[in-house]
Amino acid sequence: MKNKFINNLKNYKLENSRILLAISGGKDSMAMLDLFACFKDELKLNIVVCHFNHSLREDADRDEKFVKIQSEKYGLKFYSKKEDVLLFSNENKLSIEDGARTLRYKFFDEIKRIENLDYIATAHNKNDLAETIIMRILRGTGINGLIGIQSERGDLIRPILGFSRNEIENYIKENKIPFVEDETNFED
């Protein structure tokens, strides 16, 4: 997995880049964090970690604290922000998912600007890609909707998009990487 990941970074031409890692604390993002940490010196990367606390679950504060502690262990600068996504979504007549995405990416862009970073990296994987395409088909998408999640869009990169959930879980287990579990991932 490490060889495939560094090849992805080289394909993005990320050497000497400044990158914001969006870390939730779950398996996907913690694997991405560990992989970036493995190659940060070799590729001369300046990495900043951020965590967006949606305030939607009882464990949200636990997750934020966990990501802060892990960032410190890796010696990386850490930012977090807590927002009332439910209130924002209701006030703006958005679904919770759309409200969360709006606030989350606004925060990412703010930190990117403050730190003068080049890219924002998110931990979407192959399973997320498949889920997105299926959801779009069920909603009656046109041909353009079948594209799904792109690995790169402007300053947004998804360096583990080519990895399956199984590969990520094996990497987490083999490397004893700590993570937090979001119970909502098990809901429909």
Image (tube, rainbow, N blue to C red):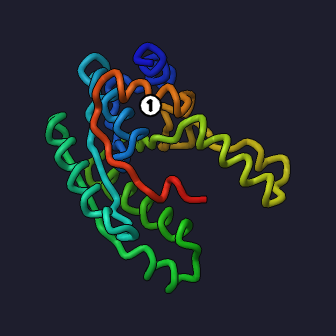
Q: Residue at x 36, y 27 (%)?
A: 173
Q: Residue at x 79, y 47 (%)?
A: 144
How many labels were placed on the picture? 1
Query: Does residue 153 lie above or below 59 as drawn?
Result: above
Quarter of the figure with the N terminus = top left
Where residue 125 appears, as percent x and y from the top left, is: 54, 37
- Quarter of the image holding residue 55? bottom left
Q: Is residue 77 left or right of residue 54?
A: left
Where residue 53 appears, as percent x and y from the top left, is: 33, 63
Kind of residue sitting beneath label 1: Glu
Q: Nearer the viewer, residue 85 or 45?
A: 85
Q: Residue at x 51, y 83 (%)?
A: 90
- Quarter of the image holding residue 105? bottom left
| Residue designated by label 1 | 169
Quarter of the figure with the C terminus = bottom right
Query: Does residue 89 lie above or below 181 as drawn?
Result: below
Where residue 130 appears, as percent x and y from the top left, is: 67, 41
Q: Nearer the viewer, residue 17 or 161?
A: 161
Residue at the top extreme of this rendering: 3
Q: Secondary structure at mark 1?
A: helix
- Quarter of the image holding residue 122? top left
